[in-house]
Amino acid sequence: MGFPFMSDLLNIEITEEQRDILLRGLRFVRSSYMLDTQEPTPKWLQERSNKIDEVVALSEQLATAAAAQTAGS
């Protein structure tokens, strides 16, 4: 997927509780990708790895934004 263009970015305001819900959901999504059982072809393994990387990156982005907001308060 790569990095989004600036015009593709969406800014939203969420509470800490909502952020925690999102992070919990992303952990579930990551686990579901990791536990997915299919014939492990090279293409499937690469696609699964890419999906997991995207979920991890999004989780880190949410966690980093929260830490930055806490530090700025």
Image (tube, rainbow, N blue to C red):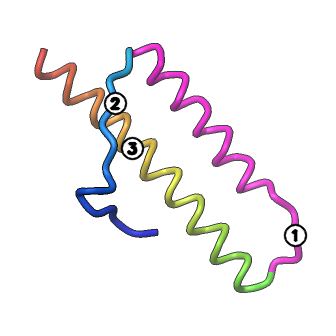
Q: Residue at (32%, 23%) from the top-left corner? A: 13
Of the numbered discs 1 and 3, the one sitting upstream in the chain is 1
Quarter-of-image position of residue 19: top left
Of the numbered discs 1 and 2, the one sitting upstream in the chain is 2
Quarter-of-image position of residue 27: top right
Q: Is residue 24 magenta?
A: yes
Residue tagged 3: 60
Residue 12 shows which numbered tag? 2
Image position of 52 with respect to 41: above or below? above
- Give the residue type at disc 1: Gln
**Which residues, given as a range, are shown in magenta?**
16-40
For residue 53, side relative to residue 7 (left or right): right
Between marks 3 and 2, how big is the CA–CA gap? 16 Å
Between marks 1 and 2, how big is the CA–CA gap? 36 Å
Q: Position of residue 47 (x, y in %)?
A: 64, 73
Outermost residue toward the front?
A: 7
Tag 3's secondary structure?
helix
Between marks 1 and 3, how big is the CA–CA gap? 27 Å
Label 3 CA crowd tier, 10 Å (few <14, some 14–19, many 20+):
few
Residue tagged 1: 38
**Secondary structure mainly formed by the magenta segment:** helix
Q: Is residue 28 magenta?
A: yes
Quarter holding the C terminus? top left
Q: Residue at (79%, 84%) from the top-left corner? A: 41
For residue 68, side relative to residue 44 (left or right): left
Tag 1's secondary structure?
loop
Residue 67 shows which numbered tag? none
